[in-house]
Amino acid sequence: MEMTPTTNQSKKTKTTFLRKLLGFISNFVFLVLLFVMCVMVFGLVQSRITGGPPSIAGRQMYIVLSGSMSPTFDAGSVVFVRPVPAGEIKVGDIVTYRARSGETLVTHRVVEVVDVDGEPGFVTRGDANDVNDEGILEAERIVGKVEYYLPYLGRVMSFTQTKQGLITLIFIPGIIIILYELKNIIGYAAALEREKLAKENAGAEKQETLETQP
């Protein structure tokens, strides 16, 4: 079967495009994996040192343990909470606050702002609940306002706190990243070596041409 130059060029173009696409996807996955690893390692180390929740850029990270805020976010998500003055909180905001027992944290939406002896108080309710939370939420029990959240990350972070999770999600990806970087370094070194040999061969050919001239 004969192939025209145009067909060959089309196949080369398609192959080059696929290689670039695969390269882009692999680099993107690598960066995402690296980012997740950095967040998890940073959070674990910080939590162990301070004894409190991990935080990034002033936002505290909490793992959602129940589905009371579904469908906004489900159990296993991570919420990023920023401490704010009570006066800045308005209806529709999602806040994290301490339960009256002081032992647990709750993350629910503000459905009403009321006045409590000249200070703001809040009526809250989980998005999945049909009734409001019991009592008025006082300003001093508020930890902060939820600015954003990431689904499923909490499950991953909880898993990393186990021995098996530490090996699976920290050490193994770390080894993969090291091998990936070694591959890039070896490829770069091989390219430099080929370039050096090409220059040496070009110089040798030039010298041979000069020697054979009468």
Image (cartoon, rainbow, N blue to C red):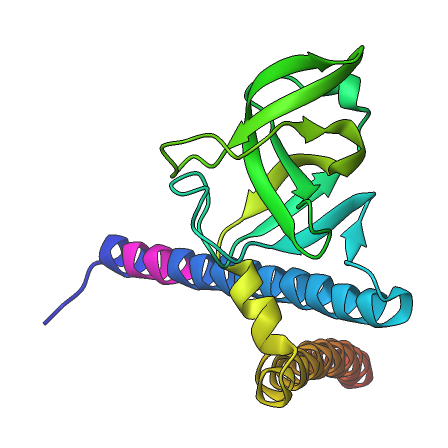
Does the magenta run of residues contain 211? no
Q: Is residue 160 visible?
A: yes
Q: Residue at x 48, y 60 (%)?
A: 25
Would you identify the image quadrant in which residue 21 lies? bottom left
Q: Quadrant of the C terminus?
A: bottom right
Residue farthest toward the right in the current orientation of the protein: 49
Does the magenta run of residues contain 12? yes
Q: Is residue 125 or residue 117 the one in the foreground?
A: 117
Q: Residue at x 63, y 27 (%)?
A: 136
Q: Is residue 57 left or right of residue 78?
A: right
Which percent across, then down, holds residue 97?
Answer: 68, 41
Q: Is residue 42 left or right of residue 103?
A: right
Which percent across, then down, holds residue 99?
Answer: 66, 46
Q: Residue at x 65, y 13 (%)?
A: 114
Secondary structure, magenta segment, majority class: helix
The range drawn in magenta is: 10-16
24 shown above or below 121? below
